[in-house]
Every structure is written in C-alpha cells, then in structure tokens.
Amino acid sequence: MQKVRVGLIGAGWVAVNRHLPALQKIPQADLKLIWSRDPEKARGVAGRFGVGATVARWQDVIHSSEVDAVIIATPPVLHLPATVEALSAGKHVLCQARMARNLDEARKMLEAARSSRLVTALYPPLPGLKGDRVMIRLLHGEEYVGTVREVRITGMSVDTDPESYRSYRWDAEVSGVNTMTLGMWNEVANRWLGPAIRVAALAQSHRHGSAAEMGVPDSVAVAARLECGATATYHFTSWAAGSPGSRIEIYGDRGALVYRLFAEEIRGLTGADAEFKPIPIPGAEQRVQDTDSQFIRAILEGTPVEPSFREGLLYMEFLEAVAISLKTGRSVSLPPEPRMETWDRFLG
C-alpha cells in the first residue's frame, strides 16, 4: 500500500485531540516526525501516538527526506514561514486555522500554494460542520427562509480567569488580527450565505494590566452588508454572563433558521409556522471533520480537499477589514488591501 509520510509541526491541543487521532486511523498515513517548542512535550506526544521521532527545530520536519507532507498545528505566527518553506521544499501542506496573522501573510501563502502545484488545505472549525449540508440545502435548495434579509452571529461566553489571558490568543504578535471565534464563525457564514462586501466595527478590551497591552480585543461588534444583500451583525465577547452562546441566526422574508454552534442543533420556522421547531440532521447528510483523510487522499489520488487556501483568504479578508475599521474608525469595503500587521498596528 502506498503511504504518505507525515511530519507534524506543533503538539498542542488540536494536534493531540484532532490530527493525531485521525491520522492513526488512516492506513495510508505514516507518522514520521513531530516538533514542539517544548521538546519534552514532543517526546511525550510521540510516544503516545507512535510517531517515529522528534526533532529540535520545525525546519527539520520540513527538510527531512522521510517526510512527504507537513501538518502545521501551531499558532498563526508560524503559518506563513512554515508553509512557504514546506512548499519550497516540495512538501504538501495542511495548515491549522486561522490561516495567518493578517491578510498580507494569507495572500503570500495562497501565492506560494498556487505556484507549487502541491496539495494545500486548511483545517475547518468543528462547530457548524455537522449540519452544514442541511443548512445549504434549506437555504439554497428549498429556499426555507426565502430571501435572506437579516443575519445575527454571536460568539459570547464568560472567561474571567486571569490565567487564560496568558494564552497566545491574546498576544497580538502571535495572533495578528484573529480574536476569539470571529474568524471561525465568519468561515461558517461564508459557506452558507456568501461573503461580506462592507463592514464597520467597534471593539474594546475588558482586561486590565499587562494583558490589555497585547492589543487583542475581547469584545467586538461588527455591522456588515453581505454580497447576497442581507444585513448582518457579529457580536463577540468573553465577558458576558448569561449570554446566548455561539449561534448563527438567519431571517428571511419567508422564514428563519437558528444554528446553535457547539450544540450542533438547528431550529427553523417557515411559511405559516407559528413557532420554531427542531430540524433533524440526517445521518446521510452529516458532515464530519475528515480533513486529515481528505488531505492524504488528495496527495495519493488527486481528489478534492477543503477548505482550500482560497476559502481561508475570504475569512482573512473579513478579519483584516474589521481590523482596519477599528483602527481608522471608518467602514471598509471588501476585499481590502492588506494594511494591518496586528489589530492595532499598520504594516511597516
């Protein structure tokens, strides 16, 4: 049996709980190398999952003659350099979301992918996948809501533990223009509704002390005009007791749909319905997070794999436009030209 020899850059939560368990179940995947900035952690993960060896530098994974494909499971700060170097070395790339720190980096990744003709893909968020095909069928096949008029997207939670803000997610130099699940839910919304064409944003940080100086907001509100003609609002915060959680609400001139992310539940109202009712997600229509196996098959058989770098660029355009709006105090048309290094700093 022909196999793809895989090297893993990163040994964090997603690597341990998503990539490695999935790769172990793929007969055509041969786990060869793993790197982590914490060598002891790399050795522990390698032993647990039967990875052949660990290396001292992430570059050693890429340039190993025993590796055909690289999975980049690190924070966004490493996505551009690792992707470009891997593609230059002739290695296929599966990169963890979010795609990059900013739009400039995302564009460079897409250019490198197109020039290489190698297999490239991004890892999708798990929330929103299970009912993805049902939502697309209801919205575009059955016109369940009619013409989409209004969209409300929320990602609200409570996280007041000071220790949580030591995470890389609140370090603008590492995360760039990413914050909370804003890019994730935009990725889902793009699949169901299409992209935004204009945004205006407000944000603030509720944190205090040195963490607040990192520049990543923990409360963001965005008003958007979608390409389909609908008006959308995004509201994200990690400081909302009693919040509705994470959901995508879609309202049309005929009906409405509410998708509860994480719970993976759909409720709908259409036509003469008096109230919302549960909408089942049939087993045959359920979508799973099988990007690792898609990636391996794409290398061996030339089959499609998604999401693509092009899909990633769409949500990076949205995040960049939001960051520009926050910095300038103006509404921004999409796609924007790359201007941001991080949330509060222009390029250059």
Image: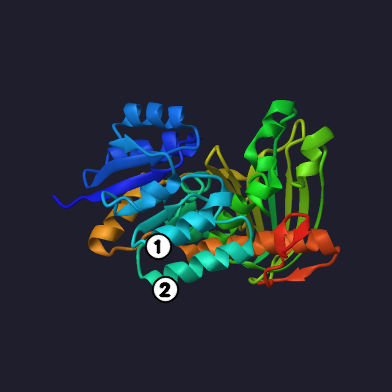
Q: Residues within 10 Å of mark 1 (few under 14, many from 20)?
A: many
Amino acid marked by disc 1: Leu
Mark 2–mark 1 Cα distance, whole angstroms, equals: 9 Å
Which residue of the protein is positioned furthest toward the left in this rendering? 1
Residue assigned mark 2 = 115
196 left or right, relative to 331: left
**Image point (54%, 67%), residue name:** 108
Residue assigned mark 1 = 87
Mark positioned earlier in the residue sequence (2 or 1): 1
Quarter of the image with the C terminus in it: bottom right
Give the image location of residue 277, x and y in percent: 58, 43
When asked about the image quadrant of residue 32, the answer is: top left
Which is nearer the eye, 283 or 334? 334
Give the image location of residue 55, x and y in percent: 38, 39
Which is nearer the eye, 35 or 93? 35
Which is nearer the eye, 282 or 231? 231
**Image point (63%, 55%), residue name:** 256
Up-down relation of residue 226 to residue 46 (above or below): below
Residues at circles 2 and 1 in contact by the CB criterion of under 8 Å: yes
Q: Is residue 257 visible?
A: no
When asked about the image quadrant of residue 224, the answer is: bottom right
Label disc, if present, on residue 296 of the rendered structure:
none
Give the image location of residue 261, x and y in percent: 58, 43
Q: Is residue 166 visible?
A: yes
- Secondary structure of residue under mark 2: helix
Amino acid marked by disc 2: Ser
